[in-house]
Amino acid sequence: MDMEKHESAPLDAKRPRTERGRRTLRKLLDAAAIEFGEKGFHEASISTITARAGTALGSFYTYFDSKEAIFQALVRDMSEAVKLAAREALDAPAPALERERQALAAFLRFAAEHKEVYRIIDEAEFVDPDSYRQHYETTGARILERLREGARKGELRGDLEEAHAWAIMGMNVFLGLRYAVWDDGAMPPERVAALANDLLARGIARMAPQGD
């Protein structure tokens, strides 16, 4: 599994100086994603991570000081991969609501392909609380910026606040859990994203008929 081909090393990894080093680091992070995703943090081991990566144990310590360090780097790496998946799916000229639909559909496709992201991010709440909080705070901030841009263009309400962005993020997270992780294929990502987008556009309250 190749999460993303990032140009730079994760914050918790020692920066590789060569292309070979960057490939080795990528192998270790991809192997760690599988190991932590299957076994969880406490049952995972450095030796199994290196075996999965096909690298020597010494290579691990070239880039990481501990199992905790590679876990922290992996959380940040996954968070960056989620951001890139959404960003690459966005059509810059598209209306604000359409951009939210595009972002959610991209996230659902990503989560279906990388189901381990949920377990790893959830475990980060206890293993690495700072990374856990940073993941959601930065995601919420990106959504809020998109909402504010839509408001500036006159496409969305002008009174949108941070809580609106977090409400959208919460909806997206649980839609991913239900339709990408628990029951992949039950509903296509585009259909899920369209339904969520309709909710944003119209709400769920039944409007009383207006008199003449």
Image: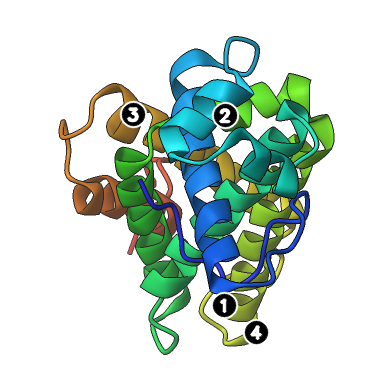
The residue singled out by tag 3 in the image is: 181
Q: Give the labeled residue for mark 2.
A: 120
Q: Nearer the viewer, mark 3 or mark 1?
A: 3
Give coordinates of residue 188: x percent, y percent: 17, 45
Q: Earlier in the sequence, mark 1 or mark 2?
A: 2
Mark 1 and mark 2: span between their CA atoms? 32 Å
| Residue at numbered disc 1 | 150
Query: Badge 4: how crowded within 10 Å, few (<14), some, or many (20+)?
Result: few
The kind of residue tagged 3 is Val
Q: Nearer the viewer, mark 4 or mark 2?
A: 2
The amino acid type of the residue labelled 1 equals: Gly
Q: Nearer the viewer, mark 4 or mark 3?
A: 3
Q: Which residue is mark 4?
A: 152
For disc 2, the neighbor class at 10 Å (few under 14, some 14 to 19, many from 20) is many
Secondary structure, mark 1, is helix
Q: Nearer the viewer, residue 162 or 79?
A: 79
